[in-house]
Image: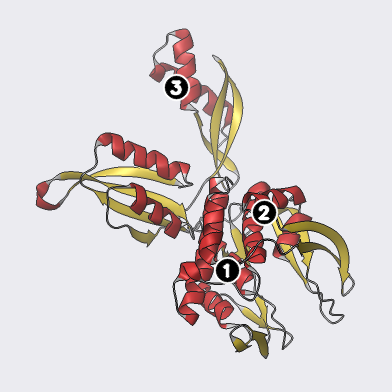
C-alpha cells in the first residue's frame, strides 16, 4: 500500500518497474488500477508472479540490490531496510541474518516493496520521511512460525525501537506488516513536520472493509518555517562514523574520502591525529543519513586500512539552499543561495565556475571569487533591516 501511495502521489509506475528489473525480479509483472475502499478512491498495485524466480534468501536480495546499478542513495536505503529485516528476524528466530528466509511475504514481494519504495522516494526527491501514529489491533495471525500475536513480534520490535505511537484498530488484522515497519522505522521517524504540500497519494490494500478504508496515505511537501517562529531545530537525524587511519598514504586517504562521498555520504573530512606509539595518522569522519550507517561502515571495513569503525548520533540543523544562475560581471555563474526561515542570508558562487572564469580572463581566482560573491550578495540577499 505504501508503494501504491507513492505511485499515486506522482511516481511513474515505470520507475518501480525499472527498479524491479534492475534487482532481477523478472518473474514479476506490475500494473495499477483505481479502486474504492469504503467509498474512498485509491490506487491499487497488482503484482503477478509467474513463479520462475525461485527461492531467495536475504543475502541474495542484498546482492541483487548491490548489483542493480540503481542510484547510490536508493541502494543504501534499500540495503539498510533489508538488513534491518534480517537482523530482527534473526534475533527472533535465531540464525545468520544473511540467510533469513522471508516466509510470510515472498522474498520477491519484499525485495520489490523495498527497492520500489526507495526508488520512488528518489524519483520524488524525498530527503526526509516522517510517519504518524500507526494502527494496531489485537488477536493472532497464522504464519510459517505458527500462530503469532498481533502485531507480529518483528513488527512490534521495530516499532518499539523507533518509539512509534500505536492507535487501537480492528482486531484480528495485520495492519502494519514487518516490511512496512522496516521501511518506516529505518528510513523515517515518528512525528509530523511543517511542510508546504505539493502532492498526496492513497494506496489501497486488497481487502475492502466497509467500516474502515483499507489504504495508506502519503503527503509530499517542501519543508517550511513559520516566519513568526524563528526557533531552529536539530531535526536532521544523521550518524557520524569515525575510523583511525595510521598506515594510509595521502593518496589513499584522499581516495577514501571520494569513495564515501560517491557512496552517498552527506559529508566527509579528515582530521590529523597522533596514533599509538606517537605515529602521525588521520581520523576519517563520515556523515551519513540515519539508517545508512551499517552499509557505509561495511564499505569502510572493506576498502579502508582499518579494523574498526565507530559511530555516534549527529543531529544536524540544516539551512535551506538552492542553486540559481546569476548574471555576474563575468557572465552566468551558478550561485548557491542559503536561506534561514525562508529568508536569503548568504550567496556564494560555485568554485568550478569561478575557476573557469579565471582561466578564461587570466584574473587571479581570489579576485574572481570576491567580485562574483559581492555582486551575488548585493543582488540576492534580502534587506535585513
Q: CA distance from mark 3 to mark 1?
A: 46 Å
Residue located 45% across and 19% down the image: 355
Q: Nearer the viewer, mark 3 or mark 1?
A: 1
Q: Nearer the viewer, mark 3 or mark 2?
A: 2
Q: CA distance from mark 1 to mark 2?
A: 19 Å
The residue that mark 3 highlights is: 369
Q: Is residue 262 left or right of residue 300?
A: right
Q: Is residue 374 above or below residue 270?
A: above
The residue that mark 1 highlights is: 182
Residue 245 % position (x, y)? 25, 47
Residue 368 % position (x, y)? 45, 17
Residue 230 appears in the picture as rendered:
no
First in sequence: mark 3 vs mark 1: 1
Q: Is residue 27 above or below residue 181?
A: above
The residue that mark 2 highlights is: 20
Residue 100 or residue 156, whichever sits in front: 100
Amino acid at each position: 500500500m505504501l508503494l501504491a501511495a507513492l505511485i499515486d502521489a506522482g511516481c511513474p509506475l515505470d520507475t518501480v518497474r525499472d527498479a524491479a528489473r534492475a534487482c532481477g525480479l523478472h518473474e514479476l509483472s506490475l500494473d495499477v488500477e483505481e479502486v474504492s475502499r469504503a467509498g474512498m478512491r485509491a490506487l491499487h498495485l497488482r503484482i503477478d508472479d509467474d513463479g520462475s524466480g525461485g527461492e531467495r534468501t536475504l543475502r541474495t536480495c542484498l546482492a541483487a540490490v548491490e548489483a542493480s546499478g540503481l542510484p547510490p542513495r536508493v541502494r543504501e536505503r534499500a540495503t539498510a531496510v533489508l538488513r534491518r529485516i534480517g537482523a530482527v528476524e534473526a534475533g527472533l528466530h535465531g540464525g545468520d541474518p544473511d540467510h533469513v528466509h522471508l516466509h510470510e511475504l515472498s522474498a520477491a514481494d519484499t525485495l520489490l516493496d523495498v527497492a520500489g519504495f526507495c526508488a520512488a522516494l528518489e524519483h520524488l526527491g524525498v530527503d526526509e520521511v516522517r510517519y504518524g501514529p500507526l494502527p494496531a489491533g489485537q488477536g493472532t495471525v497464522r504464519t510459517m512460525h505458527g500462530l503469532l500475536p498481533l502485531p507480529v513480534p518483528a513488527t512490534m520490535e521495530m516499532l518499539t525501537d523507533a518509539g512509534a505511537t500505536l492507535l487501537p484498530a480492528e482486531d484480528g488484522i495485520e495492519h502494519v506488516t514487518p516490511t512496512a515497519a522496516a521501511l518506516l522505522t529505518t528510513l523515517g521517524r515518528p512525528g509530523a513536520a511543517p511542510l508546504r504540500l505539493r502532492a498526496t497519494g492513497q494506496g489501497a490494500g486488497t481487502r475492502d472493509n466497509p467500516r474502515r478504508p483499507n489504504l495508506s496515505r502519503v503527503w509530499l511537501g517542501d519543508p517550511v518555517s513559520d516566519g513568526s517562529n524563528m526557533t531552529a531545530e536539530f531535526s536532521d537525524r544523521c550518524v557520524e562514523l569515525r575510523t583511525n587511519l595510521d598506515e594510509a598514504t595521502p593518496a589513499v586517504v584522499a581516495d577514501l574520502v571520494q569513495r564515501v562521498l560517491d557512496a552517498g555520504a552527506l559529508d566527509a573530512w579528515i582530521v590529523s591525529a597522533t596514533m599509538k606509539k606517537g605515529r602521525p595518522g588521520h581520523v576519517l569522519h563520515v556523515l551519513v543519513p540515519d539508517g545508512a550507517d551499517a552499509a557505509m561502515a561495511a564499505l569502510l571495513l572493506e576498502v579502508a586500512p582499518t579494523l574498526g569503525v565507530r559511530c555516534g548520533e549527529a543531529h544536524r540543523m540544516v539551512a535551506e539552499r538552492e542553486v540559481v544562475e546569476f548574471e555576474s560581471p563575468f557572465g552566468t555563474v551558478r550561485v548557491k543561495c542559503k536561506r534561514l526561515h525562508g529568508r536569503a542570508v548568504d550567496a556564494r558562487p560555485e568554485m568550478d565556475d569561478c575557476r573557469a572564469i579565471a582561466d578564461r580572463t587570466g584574473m587571479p581566482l581570489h579576485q574572481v571569487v570576491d567580485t562574483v560573491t559581492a555582486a551575488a550578495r548585493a543582488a540576492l540577499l534580502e534587506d535585513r533591516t
